[in-house]
């Protein structure tokens, strides 16, 4: 167990070093937005405040980070951009706002760096670097508010009037 813990810590330190040294884009130094289980490091962060090279660390299942499940099958990547659907959903469900959509291609806009797994085929730590923050913003369907007041759910994918995170209307009809 001590060897596994030491190995994990070594991988985590090396991975964080790679993440931190890779956080400069066009001379802009990134800000550490936080760390936590899932994407809790960016929970309720206003997506419009994210800048190029900002980063956070999180932890989700092996397939979400590596793109392969424990049997070697490819994880779901509906938009075929190299980021798994689970990592995109983790990011977009945590933010107040969104950074692209699960159904839109955003190759290269967010870089995921695997940082190590706690046990083989277990939860894995990752670093996420926002290389192109212009894809991030806040819309009615990603602001954590039931803008239309219909109690049918808040934001995409829970509000049936929202087609995506970037949809800017919950079909609000004034009285």
Image: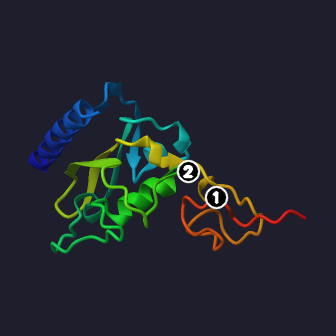
2 or 1: tag closer to the N-terminus: 2
Residue 30 pos. (x, y %) = 36, 30
- Disc 1 is placed on an element classified as loop
- Disc 2 is placed on an element classified as loop
Q: Are marks 2 and 1 in contact (CB under 8 Å)?
A: no
Residue linked to disc 2: 97
Residue linked to disc 1: 168
Please tell me in which quadrant of the rendered image residue 69 appears: bottom left
Circle 1 residues within 10 Å: few <14, some 14–19, many ≥20: some
Circle 2 residues within 10 Å: few <14, some 14–19, many ≥20: many
**Residue 107, placed above or below residue 54:** below
Q: Which residue corresponds to the image point at 13% horizontal and 42% vertical from the top-left?
A: 6
Residue 134 pos. (x, y %) = 46, 43
Image quarter (top left, top right, bottom left or bottom right) of the C terminus: bottom right
Q: Which residue corresponds to the image point at 82% horizontal and 66% vertical from the top-left?
A: 173
For this orientation, the residue located farthest to the right is: 175
């Amino acid at each position: 167990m001590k060897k596994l813990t030491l190995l994990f810590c070594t991988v985590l330190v090396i991975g964080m070093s790679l993440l931190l040294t890779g956080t400069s884009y066009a001379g802009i130094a990134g800000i550490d937005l936080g760390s936590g289980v899932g994407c809790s490091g960016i929970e309720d962060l206003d997506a419009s405040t994210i800048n190029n090279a900002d980063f956070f660390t999180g932890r989700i299942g092996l397939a979400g980070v590596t793109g392969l499940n424990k049997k070697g099958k490819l994880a779901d990547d509906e938009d075929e951009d190299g980021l798994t659907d689970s990592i995109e959903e983790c990011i977009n469900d945590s933010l107040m706002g969104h950074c692209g959509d699960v159904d839109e291609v955003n190759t290269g806009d967010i870089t995921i760096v695997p940082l190590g797994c706690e046990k083989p085929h277990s939860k894995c730590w990752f670093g996420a670097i926002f290389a192109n923050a212009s894809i991030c913003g806040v819309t009615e369907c990603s602001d954590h508010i039931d803008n239309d007041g219909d109690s049918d759910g808040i934001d995409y994918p829970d509000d049936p009037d929202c087609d995506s995170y970037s949809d800017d209307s919950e079909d609000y009809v004034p009285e």
